[in-house]
Image (spheres, grey):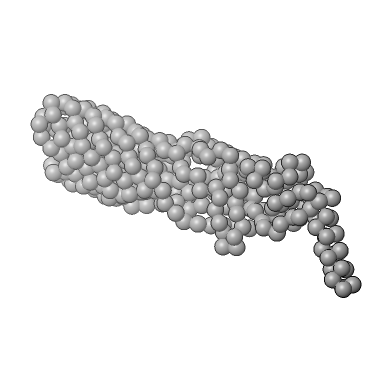
Amino acid sequence: MNKVLLILCLVSTSMLLNGCVTGRSRGILVQGTEQVRAAPEVRGANKEIQPRSNFMSVRGGMRLGKTETVKAGTLENDLDRISSCDDCEGPISNYRYAKLFYEIASTGPYAIFEYLHKFDAFTIGVSTGYDNAAYVSPVIGANFKNFEFGATVAMEVLPTKYKKTAYAVVEESDCQGLFCIDPADLGESEFDVETENSYISFAPGIYMAFFMDRFSVSYSGSVYVPDNFFDDVNTNDNRLVTKLKNDEMPAVFTNHVSVGYNITDNFVVRLGLTNVYGEFPGWHWSGSGGLEYQF
């Protein structure tokens, strides 16, 4: 009987001193890195199309550039989800903001099919294939003797890699004891999570081209917003990354410029430059080369 009373006393004292703190842990994000890529090069015919006729082409090639990692901003952790205790601030407030990095990948093959129908000057068509991502895009514009322009909206299935660096802390479910313990004082352990995934993105854009004889110069530009993979992700050991307050990621802008030469009436050789920039430092370049068949 005395042993039972002693055990009950020890358990009660422990609950009072520890404030009924649970042992479940959460990961507070301190740094996140997401891979981003150039948007597809969606453009027109790069030649005059006869009125009330069709244009089709297939093209393929390679883009070459180096992979660069740049600081892209910050993400804000929702620290209210770490503890139910209103006055538990202390060291945990140092983890409110996490660093965000973009890994800009610039190398990869492309293979594209394009179809356009021209009325009098107005053109409508579709572009689809793989160019850093599997995509499909409507193409609407106008085509003249030496010039064309238009608008596109590419729907992409973008592959990506992302990495999270987090600190594990113990989450409190109650704070009713004699002492309020700061979760950050209950122990930290840094851990990394690396994952590959894909997501659907929309990239609105424009294009224009000048052409004369066998030469053509084309430009296309577009913008998209990468998906946010840093909210509420379960790791292998069931530690949870806290939900972030700002869901929108920095936008990625892409410019494609290329020069083509018709070596025959149907075959075109094309060289180009691609630039990726946005709400992060620097202009990030890659080169491309490929062959196109027009019919």
Instruction: Name which quarter of the figure residue 208 lies in.
Output: top left
Q: Nearer the viewer, residue 185 or 66?
A: 185
Q: Position of residue 36 (x, y in %)?
A: 45, 46
- In x, y percent, where is residue 193? 56, 57
Q: Is residue 138 above or below residue 66?
A: above
Q: Nearer the viewer, residue 95 or 68?
A: 95
Q: Is residue 286 visible?
A: no
The x and y percentages for residue 266 are: 14, 44
Q: Residue at x 57, y 59 (%)?
A: 235
- From what the image shows, is residue 79 above or below residue 239? above
Looking at the image, residue 189 lies above or below residue 7:
above
Q: Indicate the position of residue 30 as horizontal and vertical percent values.
A: 64, 48
| 281 horizontally vs 190: left or right | left
Q: Who's the residue at 23% across and 40% down the image?
A: 126
Residue farthest right in this picture: 2
Quadrant including the C terminus: top left
User: Looking at the image, which is closer to me, 189 or 290?
Assistant: 189
Question: For the point 70% across and 46% down, which residue is it?
Answer: 84
